[in-house]
Image (cartoon, rainbow, N blue to C red):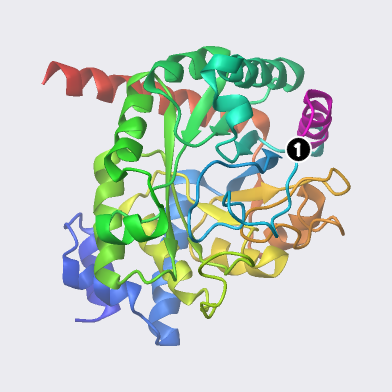
Amino acid sequence: MNIKQILFRNRCGAELSHAELAYMLELTDPAERDALFREARRIRQQNFGPEVFLYGFVYFSTYCRNGCRFCGFRSQNRQSIRYRRSREEILEAAVRLRDSGVNLLDLTMGEDPYYLNDGERGYERLLELIRAVREETGLPLMVSPGIVPERLLPYLREAGADWYALYQETHTPALYDRLRLDQPYQERWERKLSARRYGLLVEEGLLTGVGDTTADQIHSLRQMELLGARQVRTMTFVPQKGTPLENVQAGSCSRELNLIAVMRLLFPDRLIPASLDVEGLQGLKSRLDAGANVVTSLIPPDAGLAGVAQSEKDIGDGARTVQGIQPVLARCGLRAASPKQYAQWLDVAHRQDCRNERKRVSV
């Protein structure tokens, strides 16, 4: 087995085997990795051309009721940066991002009871915020509020959300239980299936470097395929101070790059992010070279907003902005998509998902 044979079979439409996926994920030879990445870029070009989509990131509340062992914003972490931005601050940041040229706004929070407590208008606060940002900016929205009740999902769509982002991190239940304490695996999975039924596009993600094996990663890729997520991502674990995993040795990002490339082979027409939240601007080119076609975690400087894996990296100096990433896009032979181009892609994705859901229900 070698990379040329695997890539040839993939081009011919063959279903790649477990062994072939493992071979690609475990690649370390520079020449073979380069061949894999070249093929991933070819597939991206074939499906999307030279345009990449840009996502503005608004982490508007870092309060969270959960105790995920890998997350710096876990409820028990006294070293965590805590804030809950006001409506005015959120809108100001959203408008700044829109004016800078992003295609979408990602409204992210921890599972903050202020927004998720039904008895104290929490849900309505969340819906009002989504409506306000949509009306003020006119941009498509991704919402990342954690697990919400199923009955809330259609209201998220009505309020103006296009996407529901909810990462499983791993699809191996035993590993999941070690990472996400007291959060049933099946509930999280089924919420994403429900989101699709209510007309929301779904983003799924996995975390690597947390004790996951190659077999775990392959299983996750297969589950992502079953889910029908329109955006799939992977990120390398960055140890967080004040968490149970803070002393885990940080690994290299080489497996993340292999995963991005393999995702491009398996999901040629899906969106695959290159996140600025792991290595900042210096890691952007390698992720784009591996086949990513979305740049995420763009954050305006001086807005007081945090990232996730790297809460402050490259934010204050303006590197994580549309302007800041332009030289990297140019070196990669890529360019930022226009709002119209993203809206067109989004419209096609919504219509395809609706057709797929109708077929599934009829069966």
**x and y, in percent, of residue 16 in the image:** 19, 62
Vertically, is 2 above or below 345? below
Frontmost residue, 344 versus 313: 313
- Reply yes or no: does residue 91 show up in magenta: yes
- Mark 1 neighbour density, 10 Å: few (under 14) some (14–19) many (20 or more): some
- Indicate left or right for 157 with 80 as reference: left
Vertically, is 237 above or below 143? below
Vertically, is 143 above or below 1? above
**x and y, in percent, of residue 236 in the image:** 51, 66
Residue carrying label 1: 101
Frontmost residue, 130 versus 174: 174
How many marks the image carries: the answer is 1
In what quadrant of the picture does the C terminus appear? top left
Amino acid of disc 1: Gly
Q: What secondary structure is the magenta-colored segment mainly?
A: helix
Q: Residue 208 is drawn in which quadrant? A: bottom left
Residue at 42%, 85% in the rendered image: 31
Q: Residue 207 is drawn in which quadrant? A: bottom left
- Reply yes or no: does residue 220 show up in magenta: no
In magenta, the rendered stretch is: 84-98
**x and y, in percent, of residue 137 in the image:** 74, 22
